[in-house]
Amino acid sequence: MRVVVVSSPGTVEVRRAPVPEPSPGELLVAMSVTGICGSDVHALHGRHPWMTLPYQPGHEVTGTVAAGGAGTAVPPGRQVAVNPLLSCGTCKRCRLGQFNLCREMNVFGCTVPGGGMADYFLIPEDRVQVLPDGMTDLQAALIEPLSTPVHAVRLAGPDLTGLSVVILGAGAIGLLTLKAARRHGATAVVMTDGSAGKRDHALRLGADAAVDALGPDAVARLRAELGGNADVVFDCVATQPTMDQAVQLALKGGTVMVVGVPTAPVTVALPEVQDQQVRIQGSALYLARDYAESMRMLADGSVRPEDFITARYPLADAAGAFLAASTGEQVKVVVTA
């Protein structure tokens, strides 16, 4: 079978390997669709804080069960999506049900040897979700990436009714945050991005306004669009400029949700944070309830694949898929079987 490996900075290879045999409790899954995440792009260029090379990508993955090891119950032929969080189940946070904060957390397709960007992959049965009849592979491939914004919105609210929201970054996570914030009642949602194409995309998907993130007057323009400060700012980029913008926009008494993965240390204007009572909240991954809400949003059409998936590549051209994702002009790039 074919297996995609990010072997060194900037290098994506399609290698040959034997089809693996599932051990007890494992499923062998034939990949249908795998998304490329911003974390994958950071890792490809050696900029991800937790992912090291080489690694096998594929954590946003859906497929069809091909075989099951001893003790498994999901039969061959069932369509499944992967929940890639591999928590220990025994540490303090796991015992509290906060599996996304597991002390020994690993992520399938990121920090362990296996990943879903391959003709076949092995996954523990308890890490798959059998999909409802009628859900397409492209819908299923968005469950995992949507779960992160759903979690962030729930931490920020969960009820955002009547609140004004700024979303910094109109990539896949930012646009999915837009959908989640609207679902939870946000009244005004303004977005930023350095790409005019992505700003237009944000407007088409329901943002009230979209501002050039690189403009010298970005904060002033965002305030003007909102008529004041933001109640909640979702930083889906997590760089020094966006964090500076986020804190300014949240003055006074607002909340900054850090959703994007910082690729380098970022400082915070602590005197303003303290004096003007700004809450800065990190948002890590998601929980089962967020995954379930993401499935509902996709099933009821609140989130449509055609609004987010802007490029598809075959597995044989995984390198082209990573290159397209790295340009910053695509919203979501997927690899298909």
Image (cartoon, grey):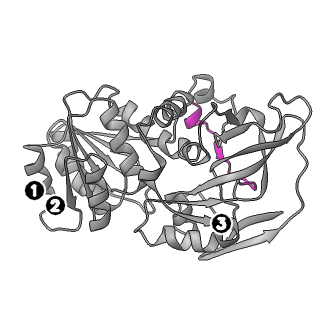
Seen in the image, is 92 located left or right of residue 327? right
Q: How far is disc 3 from disc 1 in space, using C-alphas?
A: 44 Å
Under circle 2, the secondary element is helix
Q: Residue at x 44, y 73 (%)?
A: 327
Residue 131 visible from this viewpoint: yes
- How far from the left and from the top, in percent, is residue 127? 70, 36
The amino acid type of the residue labelled 3 equals: Pro
Q: Earlier in the sequence, mark 2 or mark 3?
A: 2
Q: Nearer the viewer, residue 149 or 264?
A: 149
Q: Which residue is mark 1?
A: 220
The crowding category of the residue bearing disc 3, from other C-alpha atoms within 10 Å (few below 14, some 14 to 19, many at least 20), is some
Residue 111 visible from this viewpoint: no
Seen in the image, is 216 located left or right of residue 106? left
The amino acid type of the residue labelled 2 equals: Ala
Under circle 3, the secondary element is strand
The amino acid type of the residue labelled 1 equals: Ala
- How far from the left and from the top, in percent, is residue 105? 63, 42
Q: Earlier in the sequence, mark 3 or mark 1?
A: 1
The crowding category of the residue bearing disc 1, from other C-alpha atoms within 10 Å (few below 14, some 14 to 19, many at least 20), is some
Tag of residue 218: 2
Range of the magenta residues? 98-115
Q: Residue at x 59, y 37 (%)?
A: 135
Q: Which residue is mark 3?
A: 314
Magenta stretch holds residue 103: yes
- How far from the left and from the top, in percent, is residue 324? 51, 71
Q: Nearer the viewer, residue 199 or 112?
A: 199
Task: Verify CB contact (< 8 Å) between mark 2 and mark 3.
Answer: no
The crowding category of the residue bearing disc 2, from other C-alpha atoms within 10 Å (few below 14, some 14 to 19, many at least 20), is some
- How far from the left and from the top, in percent, is residue 111? 66, 54
Q: How far is disc 1 from disc 2 in space, using C-alphas?
A: 6 Å
Q: Residue at x 25, y 57 (%)?
A: 192
